[in-house]
Amino acid sequence: MASGAGSNFEALVLAGRTGSLQAEVVQLIVNNPGCGAQQRAQRLAINCSLLDHRQHPSREALDAAIVAQLEGQDIDLVVMAGWMRIVTPVLIDAYAGRLINIHPSLLPSFKGLDAVVQALRAGVTLAGCSVHLVSEAVDAGEILMQAAVPVLPGDDPTSLSARIQRQEHQLLPAAVALMGERLALQG
Ligand code: GRF
């Protein structure tokens, strides 16, 4: 699931294709027509569905459409890879323990929007990214994996975001692998 540029989506696809991750991305869902993620899916030949939140009367209705889209596809894990919508129990409960999100901060610090700006404003010297299970409270589910990066003198949101994103592209496939092990253990 992606809303924007889709670089994390592409990192996951490529990790699966190069064999560094034993997983296959079978489906992308986007909510913004023409977004970068949708274009990447086309280039990478990944099936992509547009479920525009503007066409759904509520968050729950959008989530129900997502669940309906994923149904019957033998999907083990659902990844919010830059999904900029708050999700509801309609989706969370349908994929209980199998819905993860990537967030550009060292959670539990700097939840919600503009996490990188929040970190810069707070003056931290260490920033980073987290992959966590999705729960109803935003960015508050169980943390699975994190990566840290330094905040360097002169950093602005663009430079720090770029440094964090390079880590995200490693962290997300690693977290998917971890979830794979976890789900296999659970049977
Ligand atoms: C990432 O920084 C992610 O942490 C946040 O949204 C951004 C998505 O970037 N949730 P991209 O669309 O994967 O390039």
Image: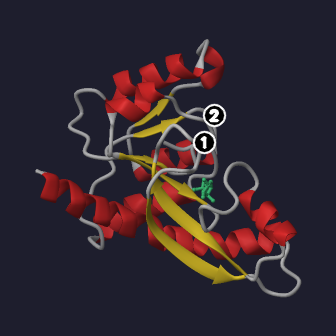
Judging depth in this view, the residue of 149 and 54 nearest the camera is: 149
Quick check: is the Cβ at mark 1 less than 8 Å away from ligand 1? yes
Residue at position x 62%, y 72% in the image:
128
The kind of secondary structure element at disc 2 is: loop
Residue 61 in the image: state x and y as whole percent.
51, 16
Neighbours of disc 2 within 10 Å: few (<14), some (14-19), many (20+): some
Residue sitting at x 62%, y 48% = 36
Q: Kindly identify which residue carries mark 2.
A: 32
N-terminal-most mark, 2 or 1: 1
Q: Amino acid at mark 1?
A: Ser
Instruction: Please say if 128 is above or below 109.
Output: below
The reply to whether callout 2 and callout 1 are in contact (CB within 8 Å) is yes
> Assess mark 2: CB under 8 A from ligand 1?
no
| Image spot of residue 59 (x, y percent) | 57, 22
Applied colour scheme: secondary structure
How many numbered discs sit on the rendered protein?
A: 2
Where in the image, quadrant-wise, is ligand 1 located? bottom right
Q: Which mark is residue 3?
A: 1
| Label 1 environment density (alpha carbons within 10 Å; few <14, some 14–19, many ≥20) | many
Identify which residue, 161 or 150, lies in the foreground.
150
Q: Residue furthest left?
A: 187
Q: Does 46 appear above or below 61?
A: below
Question: In the picture provided, is 146 more to the left or to the right than 177?
Answer: right
At x 58% / y 32%, what residue is drawn?
Answer: 31
Residue 90 location (% of width, % of height): 43, 24
Q: Position of residue 101 (x, y in %)?
A: 49, 51
The alpha-carbon separation of the residues under discs 2 and 1 comes to 6 Å
